[in-house]
Amino acid sequence: MDPDTGEQLERCPWLRKAPGRPLYTCDIYYDRPDDCKHYPVSVGQMIRDGCEMIEVKDLSDPVQAQSELDEIMEDSWA
């Protein structure tokens, strides 16, 4: 939510595209809220939410993408 207007934001205001790379970084990664620490739960959720972190290769092989996501997020979900 936008703290000034109270309106729903279209995307996370702290997510920035890395210069010259097809990656995004989080400006508040180490201080991020718990909801962010535990998101996403599934590749399907990322697709449904229009998550900026989803990659074209994830769309073409969602099973492999879910496997990679599970590995990346293992510590967050524990």
Image (spheres, helix red, strand yellow):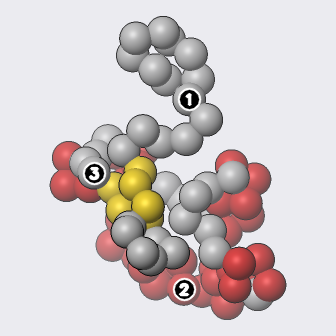
User: Does residue 48 appear in the picture of this structure?
Assistant: yes
Identify the residue at the far top of this view.
5
Q: Residue at x 56, y 29 (%)?
A: 9
**Which structural element holds mark 2?**
helix
Please give the label number shown on residue 25: none
Q: Position of residue 11 (x, y in %)?
A: 55, 41
Q: Point out the tag, 1 or 2, that comes first from the N-terminus.
A: 1
Q: Position of residue 5 (x, y in %)?
A: 48, 9
Residue under numbered circle 2: 68
Q: Point out the tag, 3 or 1, that comes first from the N-terminus.
A: 1
Q: What residue type is disc 2 on?
A: Glu
Q: Residue at x 46, y 84 (%)?
A: 71
Callouts 3 and 2 close, C-beta under 8 Å: no
Question: Gap in Å between the C-alphas at discs 1 and 2?
Answer: 28 Å
Closest to the camera, between mark 1 and mark 2, is: 1
Looking at the image, residue 59 lies above or below residue 12: below
Please give the label number shown on residue 9: 1
Q: Point out the tag, 3 or 2, that comes first from the N-terminus.
A: 3
The quarter of the displayed image where residue 25 is located: bottom left
Q: Is 65 left, or right, of 72 in this rendering?
A: right
Q: Residue at x 37, y 69 (%)?
A: 19
Q: Is 77 left, or right, of 52 in this rendering?
A: left
Q: What residue type is disc 3 on?
A: Asp
Residue under numbered circle 3: 27
| Crowd rating for badge 2 (residues with CA inside 10 Å; few <14, some 14–19, many 20+) | some
The quarter of the displayed image where residue 78 is located: bottom left
